[in-house]
Image: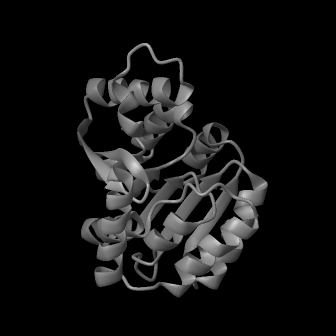
Amino acid sequence: MTGERWRAVDDYVAERLLGRDEALAAALEANAAAGLPAIDVSPLQGKFLELLVRIAQARRLLEIGTLGGYSTISMARALPADGQLVTLEYEPHHAEVAAANIARAGVADKVRIVVGPAAASLPKLAAEEGEPFDLIFIDADKPNNRTYLDWAVKLSRPGTLIILDNVVRGGEVIEPDSADASIIGTRAAFDFIADHPRLSATALQTVGAKGWDGFAMMVVS
C-alpha cells in the first residue's frame, strides 16, 4: 500500500494547491501519444522547480534533458520578460514533441532547444554563451551525471543553483557493487559533488507519484 499511499498524497496536495493545468496536462497527453517514456517530473515537482526559479530570481536557465518539455514549461513560466531557458535534448523526436508543447504553453519566446548529445552540446554552449547561468537543472542520462555536473559548474557564477534529479533511485544509490550504469553514474555524481571545492550541497529523498527517489541541490561559490 505504500506506493498507492504516496501517490494518493501527491494527488491530494496537487488538487488542493495546484488544480488542473491545461497546458501541462496537454503536454503529458501529447507525450504519451508520441510514445515518449512517462518519466517527466510530477506536477508537484514541476511547481517546485518553478518556485526555485522565482526564489533565485533567475534570468538565465539551463536544462539538461528536455524530454517532452514538462519541466521546461514549468521553469520558463517563472522567468522575467527578458529571461531565457536553454534546454538540451538528445532525441530529435523528443525535441520535436517538446517544441510543440512549449509553443502551446505560450513560452516558446523564452526557450531555446538544442538537439544532440549534451556532452557534445555543452562545450559549444560554453563557447557561445557570454553570460553564466543562474539556475541549472540536470535530468538526463544518469551515467553521464559527472560530466554534466562538471560543465554545469563551468557555466555557473558564484550563487548559481544546480539541481540534479533522480539521485536516490529507490534506495539503490547506497549499493557500492551495483552493476547498473545509472547507479554507478549517480554515485560518481555524489563523489564529484563531495570533492568539489566550489559546491555546497545537500540531497533530499522524495516519495510520491514518481516513487521513491530524490534530488541533490548545490550552490556554486
- Which percent across, then down, holds residue 138? 47, 48
Q: Is residue 152 above or below residue 40?
A: above
For residue 100, what is the image quadrant? bottom right
> Which residue sits at x=31%, y=70%?
51
> Which residue sits at x=62%, y=66%?
112
Coloration mode: one colour
In this picture, residue 204 sits left or right of residue 110: left
- Which percent across, then down, holds residue 105? 58, 83
> Which residue sits at x=42%, y=44%?
166
The residue positioned farthest toward the top in the image shown: 177
- Which percent across, then down, holds residue 154? 43, 39
For residue 199, what is the image quadrant? top left
Q: 204 or 149: nearer the eye?
A: 204
Q: 3 or 202: nearer the eye?
A: 3
- Which percent across, then down, holds residue 182? 52, 31
| Residue 132 visible, this angle | no
For residue 196, what is the image quadrant? top left
